[in-house]
Image (spheres, grey):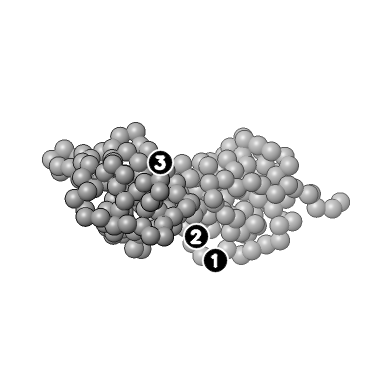
Amino acid sequence: MGALAFDQPDIPLNWTTVYPCAVDFGSRIIAGDITVQDPNNTPASCVERCDAQNFIYAGVEFSNECHCGTGLKSTPEARPTSECNMACTGDANLSCGGSDRIQIYKSPALPGGGWGLQGCFVDTPTSPAFGNPVVHHSFATNLEFIIQCVEFCQHIGYPFAGAENGEDCQCSFGFAAGAQGVDESECSTLCPLPPGDGQEFCGGVQRLMVYRYEG
């Protein structure tokens, strides 16, 4: 009997497949491994589960296992994809590893590190601060808006973060051509910090307070 033919999975959230099939014994190859047995397991659902919990590695194994973790303990031993021959419990057309065999996926998130202030920049439709692509995001509260924004951009793998008027968090890979810096006093919108810590500046009207990932 020939090997089963599985469809290629769609991996969401800009995660990438780093090991289409690898060895995984009881000691686990994924560092900080948290395993969930999911009756609806697929590579996509596992990645979404791990991403929602801020893990940067995900793996599917033995049909119903979703593994989330913070890294790899060592370089995995790659195996032929034919050894990841067990159908997913959530979609029989997709493979979800095998017995002691795991398919491993990685988040685009930047590793832990600091961010540095780049200054205040004009941000209008005709004179944008950031070059495309730009991801815009808002939060339920503007408490500690700058921390929320840089952590969000770091999680999705963008090394530039910007706060505009205390409500618009922007992520990008760099400045737009001709980006216009202005005095930081023009980024004068205030956002609250925890009680006792005062306030922080988080951009202004058509003004973007920009931070850059420094690793």
Please, which residue is most extreme toward the front here? 126
Front one among 196 and 20: 196
- Residue 169 falls in which quadrant of the image? top left
Please tell me the numbered disc located at residue 75: 1
Residue at figure coordinates x 61%, y 65% from the top left: 77
Q: Is residue 79 left or right of residue 176?
A: right
Q: Is residue 154 visible?
A: no
Circles 1 and 2: CB atoms closer than 8 Å: yes
Q: Earlier in the sequence, mark 3 or mark 2?
A: 2
| Residue highlighted by disc 2 | 72
**Foreground residue, 15 or 92?**
15
- Residues marked 1 and 3 touching at CB (< 8 Å): no
**Residue pointed to by mark 3:** 137
- Residue at 51% x, 41% y is 49
* Above or below, 211 relative to 164: below
**Circle 1: residue type:** Thr
Which disc, if any, is residue 51?
none
Q: What kind of element bears circle 2?
A: strand
